[in-house]
Image: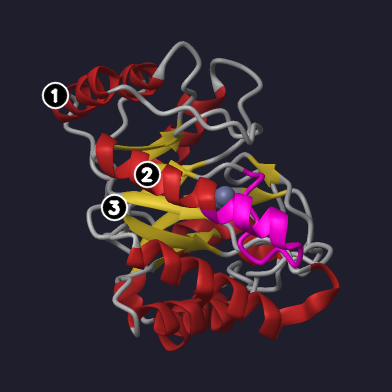
Amino acid sequence: MPLGVHTSIAGGLCKSVERAVSLGCDAMQMFGRNPRAWAWSPVSETDAALFRSKREEALLWPVAIHTTYLINLSAPDDVIFDKSVFLFKKELETAERLGADYLVTHLGSPGEMGRDFALRRILSALKETASAGLGKKTRVLLENTAGGGSGFGSSLADIGRIIEGASAFGLDAGLCYDTCHGFAAGYDMRTRDDVESLVKGIDKETGFKNLKLMHLNDSKGELNSRLDRHEHIGKGRIGIDGFAILLNHPKVLKTPLILETPKKTEGDDPMNLATIKRIIGEA
Ligand SMILES: [Zn+2]
Ligand SMILES: [Zn+2]
C-alpha cells in the first residue's frame, strides 16, 4: 500500500515533493495554497509544469491536495457559501493543473440549519463544480470529520448520500477516511470486531470502491469525544493494535495511506512512518 505524509509547501509547491522524497514516501498530501487565507492567486504555468515533472520523477502516487480550512460548503450565509464555492472550484482547477489525483475536502458547518440543509448545500456546490467541467482529472474526496460543534460530515451515511447524489450529475466523488476523526465520532477500531464493523460500515454507507485514501492519525480524544486532536500512531486512545488490525484487513490492504500526525520535531514523521511499516504485515 502506498504510504506518505502531509508535507509542507513552505518555500514553494515543489518543496513538498522534495520533502516527501527525503522521507522515503510513495504517496503525499499537501495544501495547494496558504490554508488560512481567502485571497486567491493562481499558480503560474511554469510552476505547475515544474511540479508535474518533479512529482513524476519522484514516482509519487497518489498525490492529494487538501483544501483550505476556510472553505465551508454547507455555510448558511450566502456570501460565505459563494466565496467557499469559488475557492473550492479554484482549488480543484489548480489540483487538476498540478496533476493531483485527489482533492480532499471537509464538509463544513451548517450552523443551526442542520443536516438536510447541509446535504442540499454541498450537493449544490458540487453540482456547480461539475457543471464547470471540473472533477474529472482530479477526484474530489470527502473527508469524515470528528463532528465537534455544528460540524457536518462525521457520519459515513451522510457522506454516502453525497457521493450518491453527486453521481447523479456526473461527479465521481469518493471517501477519505480519517482514523482520528472516525474514532472521535464514535467509529471504534480497537479490536478485530470493531474493525470488522467499521469496514462493513464503510462498504454499506459509501461503497468500498469509493474509499480512495486514508488519513492515519491516532486520537488524543476518547471514542465519541468529538475532539479533532491528532496523536502519534500508537500513542493515543486508538492504540497500535487497532491500526495493525485495520491496515492488515484484506479490504483495506491496497488503500493509499497518508499520515497527518503531529510534527513537533524532525524525527516525528520518520518515527510514524516506521511504525506503520512495522505493523503492515503484522496483525
Ligand atoms: Zn482534513
Ligand atoms: Zn484528516
Residue corresponding to mark 1? 57
**Quadrant location, the C terminus:** bottom left
Residue at the (46%, 25%) spot, across then down: 270
Q: CA distance from mark 2 to mark 1?
A: 17 Å
**Residue 3 at what x, y percent from top left?**
34, 42
Q: Is residue 275 above or below residue 51?
A: below
Q: For mark 2, what is the residue?
A: 64
**Depth-wise, is mark 2 or mark 3 nearer the camera?**
3
Q: Nearest to the eye among marks 1 and 3: give it.
A: 3
Mark 2 and mark 3 lie on one chain; the one further toward the N terminus is: 2
- The kind of residue tagged 2 is Ala
Asked if 192 appears above or below 15 in the picture, the reply is below
State the residue position of label 3.
Answer: 138
Q: Write the residue at 56% across / 84% down.
A: 157
User: Which segment did they paint magenta?
Assistant: 69-85
88 in relation to 271, above or below: below
- State how far apart marks 1 and 3 are (Cα): 19 Å
Task: Give the quadrant of residue 266.
Answer: top right
